[in-house]
Amino acid sequence: MNEEDVLQFLAAETYSGGTNLDFQMEQYIYKKKSDGIYSINMKRTLKKFLLAACATVATENPAISAMSFRNTGQPAVLKLVAASGAISIAGHVTPESFTNQIQAAFREPRLPMRDPEETEKKEQATAENFVRKEEFQGEWTSLALEFPATQLEVADWSEGTRVPSVPSQRFCSEV
């Protein structure tokens, strides 16, 4: 990493992170400032930028889709699109535009680029939803254990025991 790279990082203020520290980001943190904002390790960040640049250069421009749904990420997406000729998706995406080929807005990008914070929020919401389902199922399971249904004893059919039944006409007329 040379002096010119450092000056570009400083000019773009890419070294400045946020106040939240995720365990996956710990390896990219240089230090924490007194105001609680984390400084990003520029050397590791440059390596990731170069890796992303190699993937971007190897892909045809129209096959790249850059997306950001947050207002803070949209200017960066528009700058990338202006510089590279990629497809911009700033704002909301039509549901199934990447999966349903019948859609008029169908796109099949080879290299989708998304805002990582937006991805993290969706993953967290999915995980929370999964936990809620487990809690819900756990409540019903415990209720079933507390109030067991009475089990009817069914005799062997060969003994000729009559089993009461409900006429099927009653259920068919209700439907």
Image (tube, helix red, strand yellow):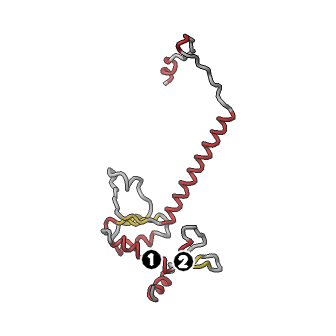
Residue 47 got which mark?
Answer: 1
Foreground tag (2 vs 1): 1
Label 1: few (<14), some or many (≥20) within 10 Å?
A: few
Q: Amino acid at mark 1?
A: Lys
Percent coordinates x, y for residue 128 in the rendering: 58, 53
| Quadrant of the snapshot with the N terminus | bottom left
Instruction: Tell me if residue 56 comes above or below residue 102 in the rendering.
Output: below
Which secondary structure, mark 1? helix
Residue at (59%, 50%) from the top-left corner?
131
Badge 2 vs badge 1, beta-carbon distance below 8 Å: no
The answer to which of 30 and 14 lies nearer the viewer is 30
Which secondary structure, mark 2? strand
Tell which circle, 2 or 1, labels the residue nearer the N-terminal end: 2
Q: As drawn, is 126 to the left or to the right of 139?
A: left
The answer to which of 149 and 34 lies nearer the viewer is 149
The answer to which of 30 and 66 lies nearer the viewer is 30
Label 2: few (<14), some or many (≥20) within 10 Å?
A: many
Q: Amino acid at mark 2?
A: Ile
Instruction: Tell me if residue 8 comes above or below residue 95 in the rendering.
Output: below
Residue at (69%, 35%) from the top-left corner?
146
Residue at (65%, 25%) from the top-left corner?
150
Percent coordinates x, y for residue 22 in the rendering: 57, 67
Residue 40 got which mark?
Answer: 2
Residue at (42%, 65%) from the top-left corner?
67
Percent coordinates x, y for residue 2 in the rendering: 45, 87
CA distance for labels 2 and 1: 13 Å
